[in-house]
Image: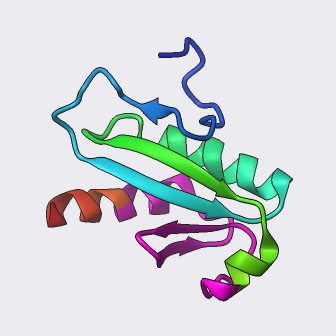
Amino acid sequence: MRAEYCYALPEGEVLHTEHPEWPLFRVTIHGSDTERIKLSKRLVCAVKHLPLRLQIHYEKDPMRSIEEGVAKDPTLTLDGRILLEGLVSAEEITQTFEKLLQEK
């Protein structure tokens, strides 16, 4: 685990690897480099206290993103469905993942 907790999670790295019993969410962030990094940092900060593991894929190909129905920069998807669009607040990210945890 890193000393600085609110950071852009490198692609493929898993947040909270020390808790294999927690559910793993494999998400994709679509968008430009700058917006992807901003959302990744905000995402890590927003979910770091939740009992979940997180792995991020960064989609850099705009054509693939468009084919998946992504229209805003940045967009967060999970299992092909859009979770969040735009640079949303940390509170909104936390609420979204709290709901996802309840569904598990």
- Extreme residue toward the top, this view: 3
Residue 28 left/right relative to 20: right
Indicate whether 79 appears above or below 38. below
The colour scheme used here is: rainbow
Indicate whether 96 appears above or below 70. above
- Residue visible at 53% across and 53% down in the picture: 90
- Residue visible at 44% across and 34% down in the picture: 14
- Residue visible at 73% across and 54% down in the picture: 36
- Residue visible at 71% across and 84% down in the picture: 66
Percent from the top left, x then y, of residue 96? 38, 64
Percent from the top left, x then y, of residue 63? 78, 80
Residue 42 left/right relative to 100: right
- Counting every numbered tag in the picture gives 0
The answer to which of 59 and 22 lies nearer the viewer is 59
* Quadrant of the rendered image containing residue 41: top right
Residue 90 left/right relative to 96: right
Indicate whether 57 appears above or below 81. above
Question: Is residue 71 shown to the viewer in this render?
Answer: no
Q: Which residues are magenta?
A: 67-96
Percent from the top left, x then y, of residue 71? 71, 85
Q: Quadrant of the C terminus?
A: bottom left
Percent from the top left, x then y, of residue 76? 56, 66
Indicate whether 66 appears above or below 62. below
The answer to which of 28 and 50 lies nearer the viewer is 28
- In the rendered image, residue 32 lying in the magenta stretch gets the answer no
Question: Is residue 74 shown to the viewer in this render?
Answer: yes
